Every structure is written in C-alpha cells, then in structure tokens.
Image: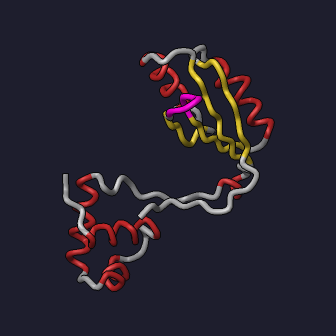
Amino acid sequence: MQKIDRIDLEILSELQRDCKQPIKVLSEKLNLSITPIRERIKKLEASGAIDKYVAVVNPRVLGKGLTVYCMVTLVKHQEKYFEEFEEFTSTLPEVVEIVYVSGSYDYLLKLVLDDMKDFENFIVRKISRLDVISNIQSSFVIHQKDKKLSFL
C-alpha cells in the first residue's frame, strides 16, 4: 500500500471538493508544478486511494422528491441470508446505499424515490417479498441541510 503524505492528502482534499478542476489550478493552489501533481494523482488512482470520479446529481431536479432510510432486520444472522439480501437489494434502482450495521437492526438502506406511491410500491412489490427479512422500519427525510461528500 502506498504511503499517503501531507501533499497527497491535500491533493485528495482538493479533488473531493472539485475533481474537474484543471491540474494547473491544483498546482497553483498547492504550490507544486504540474508534473508531480499529475504523477501523484496517477499513483493515488493506481493504489485505490482514488476510487472513482463522479458527478453528484440533484435527485429533486429529476423528480425524485422522497429520500427514505429503511432499517432492516433479517430473520437470522447467517451468511446465506446476508448474501441473498445484499444481492437482491443491489439490483434495485431505488436503493442508493446498502450499509451493514451493528445495533438493533442489520442493514440501513438509503432510498431515493419519486413519491409515497413509489415508496409503497418498493415496500409491497419488491422488498417485502424477501423471506430473509423479519422487520423493516422507515424514516423519511423531511429536510437535508447539508450533504458533504468529502471527509478530508
């Protein structure tokens, strides 16, 4: 694994804020020449420190006005149940995050949907058909103040 130094962290932090900024701008911000910046980015990509570059899309602009967190408890804590649940939910377009957690439930799902009718369809016609689920609790996002994608 590549050792990440202070300069790498600064590069990663800048890329988290805006991955489309030109390398020239990045080099000016970090007071380094373009070639070392480019080489470091390539190494960070090769090492897996940079997973991918994405565009963050506003779901509301696309008519997706409902965000829901579903807390799911499985029938048993057995590998085959976890695998079946993860395999099935990863195919559902409404599910944007699948997180295996500790605590009073097993999974936290983040859903992005059009509306309550869309949510009802998701629960009744899709996820409730899985026999490995014993309980689903849902919380609806009323307001989201800030959505941070960077952690550096």
Q: Which residues are magenta?
A: 102-107
Residue 19 position by quadrant: bottom left
Q: Is residue 59 above or below residue 93?
A: below
Residue 62 position by quadrant: bottom right
Observer-nearest of 72 and 18: 72
| Residue 94 on image: x %, y % | 63, 38
Left or right: where 52 falls relative to 75: left
Q: Is residue 10 above or below residue 64?
A: below
Q: Is residue 31 magenta?
A: no
Q: Is residue 93 above or below residue 29?
A: above
Residue 53 position by quadrant: bottom left
Q: Name the image quarter holding the C terminus.
A: bottom left
Left or right: where 143 falls relative to 79: right
Q: Is residue 103 magenta?
A: yes
Give the prevailing secondary structure in the magenta stretch: loop
> Residue at 63% of width from left, 62% of height from top?
146
| Residue 95 on image: x %, y % | 59, 38
> Residue at 52% of width from left, 37% of height from top?
98
> Residue at 66% of width from left, 53% of height from top?
59
> Residue at 35% of width from left, 66% of height from top?
12
| Residue 80 on image: x %, y % | 44, 16
Left or right: where 119 falls relative to 24: right
Q: Is residue 147 above or below residue 26?
A: above
Left or right: where 53 falls relative to 72: left
| Residue 66 on image: x %, y % | 73, 46
Observer-nearest of 23 and 50: 50
